[in-house]
Amino acid sequence: MWMNKKHTGTEHKFDIRIERPPSKPDVLDELISILQKFLDFCVCCITCGCYKRPKDGIVTDEYGMILLDNEKQAVQNLLQYLEKDEKADPLLSSEHIRALSILTYSDNAELQRSAALCMLEISEKLKTDLTVALGRPLVELLRSSDTQVQKAATLAVSNFCLTGADTNKEILMRLGVADPLVELLSSKNVEVQCNTCGCITALATTDVNKHSIVSSNAIKPLLRLMRSTDLRVKRNATGAILNLTHIQSNRNELVNQGAIPALVELIHMSDYDIQYYSAAALSNLAVNPKHRAMMIAVGHFDVVRQLVKLLSSKKDRVKCQACFALRNLASDDENQLLAVENGALPPLHHILTSCRSETLAAAAACLRNLSIHKLNETPFIHENLVPDLCHVVCDSSNPEAQKHIAGTLRNLAVSQYVRILIENDCVEALTFVLLDLESRTPVLSEVTAALAVMADEDDVKYKLLHLQGGKAFGKLVTLASLSSHREIQYNSAGTLGQLALVSIPEDLKETNKKGIVLYIDKFLKSPDPSFVHVALWTLNILLKDIFFLRAFTDHSIESVIEQVQATHQQTKIQELSSSVTDKLHGVMISSSSSED
């Protein structure tokens, strides 16, 4: 029950900001102008030149009368839609979508550009969800070889993903958007690269989508773009890689294709977004022991040194991800030493006293893993962390931090420095949390485990019996007998067994008699041998007191002991059961003699 626990995970949420074009083009005016020129050209042809043609050459002579009737009608339909007042909330009808499709599949490059620009405008003003009918031409536009079409179409996809319902992403993925997007990652145009990476980041928010994107061979081009000289592209590519690290199958593939050296390189950058994304991605990959070993091998422990530096970042979110990455790396004993040797404790201590919320919880989780190693105990004490650990563990506004700090105190309690913990009022702090009605189950699990370790000290036994008028003792009895959480039950019973070794005040005996009898009875009837063992061990101690001897005799505990002997054949349980039976027979013989 008092094992040192190592915690790894990827349970936190990530704040990814998708980079957009530096300035939004005036799409509507440009689009209306292009479509109007097409109509003017058509009118010019129909009137044999009586209506003058456009003079800027946007419609070439080669195209001439090849402009089909359905394309002319499509242009008119889209102009009607686009020229409506924005406040009128124009409805996108099936005719408008058909018009878009006609322009999309046209052989004329200008009409395709018009379709892409129109799609971009729709993506910014559409008040309803994306439909299959509208999504199909959009995905087709991504396959265009025209750079201007690619720019507008990728930006439209990004808009539908970021501002629309989640069903927009589902529809786009069902229509096969991943393959053309992956192809566009190889574009030579920086804006297309940037937009496309942003699209993949936005789409990679469900496990199904993440798996599909990797299956479309997105990893290699994304890793290549992580080394782009354009900062926006680099950010979006790294954000996309981060999102892909959330599922185990992707992590293995990412590592196989070289993600670790690339990410280790990026955490050295001065850009806060890049630091955040790369540290978070490394944290996710570090859940796997083999991946941790590879990270450490890259640059000969360089990743640990750099993550320790990031603990002092000016940005909380960077600190937070550096904490998580170090926490996961510190699942291995040698990395626990490496982190402390490279100066992790001072910045983590500073975070404890200066940060709040998720960053504080992340630092607490990191400290918990670092406190496991025996050789780190002295640095922890020299850093004078204990008073601040006690302060954080009492703050119920951050239960995640409470949980990990209680685990840290438990780890330190098994060290040679347990007296320092006691002198710094750790018992009082843990008792405060124990009695706090707002304390959550995971917190109580760690708190009771820490108290069970510290209760080995005699003065701690005394404190737990007398703090707040014995309320701590009563709470432990209640948790042992009534908690639905097995670890809390077991830890509380272990502490009570330690307290039974000293004289329990008479008023506490009487007040808690029913609860003590109840939890002993429940533990003895448990199928778990460890529960039975702790109950028998405690019962042997309690039966030395005539008060409890009578209480358990009145409860007919002997029949329960007989059942234990018949069910559990372990030698230690049989020995303890026999000892309890002997004590019970002693009181029966004594009672019989008194009656004679």
Image (cartoon, helix red, strand yellow):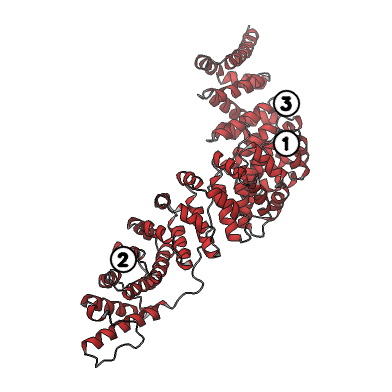
Spatial separation of the CA atoms under disc 2 and disc 1: 63 Å
Image mark for residue 467: none
380 vs 575: above or below: below
Residue occupied by mark 1: 375
Q: Nearer the viewer, residue 319 or 333?
A: 333
The answer to whether any part of residue 326 appears in the image is yes
Residue type of the residue flagged with mark 1:
Leu
Spatial separation of the CA atoms under disc 1 and disc 3: 37 Å
Q: Are marks 1 and 3 in contact (CB under 8 Å)?
A: no
Q: Nearer the viewer, mark 1 or mark 3?
A: 1
Residue drawn 40% across the image and 72% down it: 148
Q: Nearer the viewer, mark 3 or mark 2?
A: 2
Q: Quadrant of residue 147?
A: bottom left
Spatial separation of the CA atoms under disc 3 and disc 2: 82 Å
Q: Are marks 2 and 1 in contact (CB under 8 Å)?
A: no
Secondary structure beneath disc 3?
loop
Residue occupied by mark 3: 503
Residue type of the residue flagged with mark 3:
Ser
* Residue 368 image position (x, y, % from top left): 65, 42
